[in-house]
Image (cartoon, grey):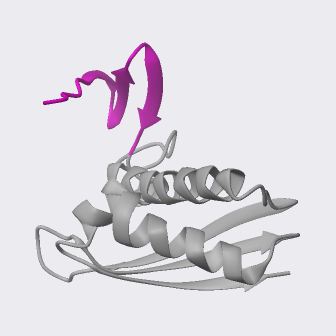
Amino acid sequence: MKTMQAKMIWKGNMEMESEIRGLKVTMDAKEEDGGLNKGQTPKELVLSGLCGCTGMDVIAILKKMRSLPESFTIEAEATLTEEHPKVFNNIHLKYIAKGVEKEKLEKAVKLSQEKYCGVSAMLRKTAEITYEIIVL
């Protein structure tokens, strides 16, 4: 069984630094929540992680299809529950690509969402994940 280890260091106020494999990420609270806005909040990092996970899947699949796009972006919007613990309950992803066949992109996104993206699989336990595909 694979394991993952992280180390968190408090940097002062609400700023935290997470380190995994020697790579560091700064987290902070928004100013209205007592932070100094020096980094993404933990929930924002989860949403960023979702985009990165599915994005890497899609590019890897398109690469195997020999159909890399000229450009590729994912935009994500999530809503949170009203009560604590506030968790994502809806997430909508927009996959936006240029210079790729729509059918191939659709297949890659479907494979990512239904088979490969572990972050999507985890988040789907509490949130509905929807998506749309836009080819420019």
Q: Is 79 above or below relative to 15?
A: below
The answer to which image quadrant residue 91 occupies is: bottom left
Q: Is 52 above or below relative to 10?
A: below
User: How many marks do you count on the picture?
Assistant: 0
Residue plotted at (86% across, 81% down): 136
| In the image, residue 127 lies in the stretch drawn in magenta | no
- In the image, 85 versus 104, the foreground residue is 104
> Can I make out residue 10 in this image?
yes
Q: The N terminus lies in which quarter of the figure? A: top left
- Left or right: where 109 falls relative to 115: right
The answer to which image quadrant residue 16 occupies is: top left
Residue 78 x, y percent position in the rendering: 41, 76
Residue plotted at (88% across, 69% down): 99
- Left or right: where 78 falls relative to 101: left
Q: Which region is colored magenta?
A: 1-28
- In the image, 28 versus 59, the foreground residue is 59
Outermost residue, top side: 22
Q: Is 108 above or below relative to 59?
A: below
- In the image, 87 versus 113, the foreground residue is 113
| In the image, residue 20 lies in the stretch drawn in magenta | yes
Residue 18 x, y percent position in the rendering: 35, 27
- Left or right: where 101 falls relative to 103: right
